Image (cartoon, rainbow, N blue to C red):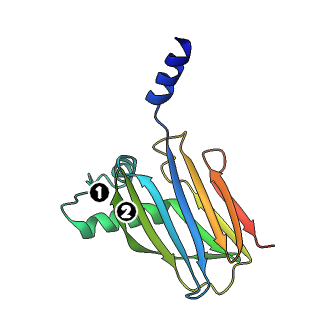
Amino acid sequence: MIHILSILLFLLHPFYVSVTDIKHNQKSKTLEISSKIFSDDLEKAIFNDSKVKLDIAQPSDKAQASNLVALYLKKHLSISVNDRVIALKSVGYEVIDDAVWCYLETEKVNSVKKIDIKNDILLALHPQQINIMNLKIGINEAHFKLDLQQITYTYTAP
């Protein structure tokens, strides 16, 4: 009986996680970024930041929705390459099931010797939020999590 109760409590307890992939495209010499964030959490976070109520899946104004999503991401995700802050450009987003896939790219980045990432997506909304990061630079990969205790990560190429 206790085992069943533990399972039920686990299932009822919400979890807060996002996944962000960052890949250096050597052909276009840009960083390609995709973030998977639960739709309801992103809508609440955007409302808290902008006071605009948004239905991401069926927005009344798609351009405004895209702009609000981009503004939120640019405020809560920042990247420096080789000690230089890199501008993020929104490519758009799509809703798949209960999550939003947000796509960003950067200006030209010829080589990546060092990358500094700050990700505090949804942390103001959910202090227990975990932001999983996957980084691919050439043949090298790094996987790490960022949370309220650690919102930044520095990767140095071998």
Mark 1 lies on a secondary structure that is loop
What count of labels does the image hold?
2
Classify 24 as above or below 52.
Answer: below
Q: Nearer the viewer, mark 2 or mark 1?
A: 1
Taking depth in this image into account, of 48 and 143 the one nearest to the observer is 143
- In the picture, measured across the screen, residue 144 lies left or right of residue 8, that is right
Dot 2 alpha-carbon crowd within 10 angstroms: few under 14, some 14 to 19, many 20 or more: many
Classify 44 as above or below 24.
Answer: above
- In the picture, measured across the screen, residue 71 lies left or right of residue 1, that is left
Place of residue 107 in the rendered image (x, y in percent of width and height, measured from the top left): 53, 83
What distance separates the C-alpha of mark 2 from that of mark 1? 9 Å
Give amino acid for label 1: Ile
Residue furthest top in the image: 1
Dot 1 alpha-carbon crowd within 10 angstroms: few under 14, some 14 to 19, many 20 or more: many
Give amino acid for label 2: Val
* Dot placed on the residue nearer the N-terminal end, 2 or 1: 1
